[in-house]
Image: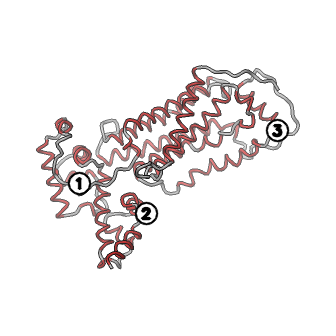
């Protein structure tokens, strides 16, 4: 079996840096933070961490093949192929969990293709070294001669391996578009335009999603230009760019990847520090104060947050303002998105009911409905996120202390 010397250049260095950064981010998002311990416990962060590790695995194999290191570790050939079926679902999980604070229903079904391909990969992992050598040179060095071996075992029970690139492209495209639709829906519910300004977190999530959805487009442009996998180093460099842009967002504002802690009861008092920011607002300070005062009165008299169908446009209509201005006001003055603001009040009301001995007979499902949740699982998820306890644990603790 003929081997070739190690080939290193600027592209190889860029891919290597992407591998290192991808591994770093993966471990970063999967481990608890030092002070609060909530980073690794956040479901969106876990999905993003696994997504980064999957990307790192894929470009690691491309690095080995591109630099000819694979001649020295032929047993690793195609080791990352199953991860092709993880990157799409994991990024979609991240976007969905970032907005809804939970995984989508039936999320396990999305991992079936990965499981099937992982099982399928066993059929080529245990092939003789000659088979792996031929697979490598077929993809990266077609100028070399194959070696013969009569000891091959049957491979690929799915009979789809020849189409792995097309299937990967389709998977990334479907999940990328799906993630865009989730972000678009969040924009619509917040009353903002998808192409316009919004909260920092939602805007960064939109930009990162558009960058990821462009990946299958890049695949479709590059792959036809090269024989087999010879152009994969360009894709690896593009993935490296995605990893480093994600790193930039982490450094720019860690609150993008971390759930905000619930604030104290909102008031209409103004902090003197962000005055310049308010002066740039489309609303005058006097009008902002008037809307905040009206909101405070509405909360006392009607408790609109208990309505299961309350939305940003509906609340804005009752306050005689626009959804965009109300969203801006909640973000600037109270430091919360509409969804976080709504969750804060609903969970505060739920805690009152769980604390009250006179409502101890109510089931958790009934309390969930009383505070405006149509889904008990969503109530559980939000309650746990804001209190670090389940509703049942909170009730048992509070009533036990009161006894």
Q: For mark 3, does the 10 Å Cα neighbourhood hold few (<14), some (14 to 19), or many (20 or more) residues? A: some
- Give the x, y percent position of residue 100: 40, 52
User: Residue farthest to the front?
Assistant: 34
* Count of numbered circles in the view: 3
Query: Is the Cβ of the residue at disc 3 closer than 8 Å to that at disc 1?
Result: no
Mark identifier at residue 315: 1
Which residue lies under the disc numbered 2? 377
**Is 81 or 245 nearer to us in this picture?**
245
- Relative to the observer, which residue lies in front, 175 or 237? 237
Alpha carbon distance from label 3 to label 1:
67 Å
Q: Report crowding for label 2: few under 14, some 14 to 19, many 20 or more residues within 10 A (C-alpha).
A: few
Q: Of helix, strand and loop, which one carries label 1? A: helix
Q: Quadrant of the C terminus?
A: bottom left
Could you say where residue 71 lies in the image, as x and y percent from the top left? 74, 29
Return the residue at label 3: 128
Instruction: Indicate whether 157 appears above or below 59.
Output: below
């Amino acid at each position: 079996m003929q081997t070739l010397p190690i080939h290193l250049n600027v592209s190889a260095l860029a891919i290597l840096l992407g591998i290192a950064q991808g591994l770093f981010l993966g471990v970063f998002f999967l481990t608890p933070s030092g002070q609060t311990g909530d980073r690794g416990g956040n479901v969106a962060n876990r999905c993003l961490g696994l997504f980064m590790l999957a990307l790192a695995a894929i470009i690691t194999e491309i690095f080995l093949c591109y630099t000819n290191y694979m001649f020295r570790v032929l047993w690793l050939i195609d080791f990352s192929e199953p991860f092709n079926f993880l990157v799409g679902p994991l990024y979609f999980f991240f976007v969905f969990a970032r907005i809804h604070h939970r995984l989508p229903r039936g999320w396990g079904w999305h991992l079936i293709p990965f499981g099937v391909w992982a099982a399928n990969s066993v059929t080529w992992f245990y092939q003789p070294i000659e088979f792996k050598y031929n697979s490598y040179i077929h993809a990266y060095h077609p100028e070399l001669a194959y070696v013969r071996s009569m000891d091959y075992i049957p491979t690929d029970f799915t009979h789809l391996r020849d189409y792995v690139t097309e299937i990967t492209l389709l998977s990334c495209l479907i999940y990328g578009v799906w993630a865009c639709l989730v972000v678009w829906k969040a924009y619509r519910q917040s009353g903002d335009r998808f192409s316009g300004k919004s909260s920092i977190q939602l805007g960064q999530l939109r930009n990162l999603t558009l960058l990821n959805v462009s990946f299958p487009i890049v695949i479709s442009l590059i792959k036809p230009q090269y024989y087999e996998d010879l152009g994969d180093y360009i894709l690896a460099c593009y993935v490296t760019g995605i990893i480093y842009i994600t790193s930039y967002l982490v450094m720019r504002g860690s609150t993008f990847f971390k759930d905000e802690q619930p604030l104290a009861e909102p008031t209409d008092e103004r902090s003197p520090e962000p005055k310049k920011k308010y002066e740039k607002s489309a609303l005058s300070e006097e009008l902002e104060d008037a809307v905040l005062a009206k909101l405070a009165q509405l909360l006392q008299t009607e408790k609109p947050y208990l309505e299961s169908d309350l939305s940003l446009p509906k609340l804005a209509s009752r306050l005689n303002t626009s959804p965009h201005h109300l969203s801006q006001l909640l973000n600037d003055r109270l430091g919360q998105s509409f969804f976080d603001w709504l969750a804060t009040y609903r969970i505060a009301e739920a805690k009152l009911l769980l604390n009250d001995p006179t409502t101890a007979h109510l089931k958790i499902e009934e309390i969930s409905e009383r505070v405006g949740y149509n889904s008990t699982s969503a109530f559980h998820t939000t309650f746990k996120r804001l209190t670090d306890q389940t509703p049942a644990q909170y009730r048992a603790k509070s009533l036990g202390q009161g006894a």
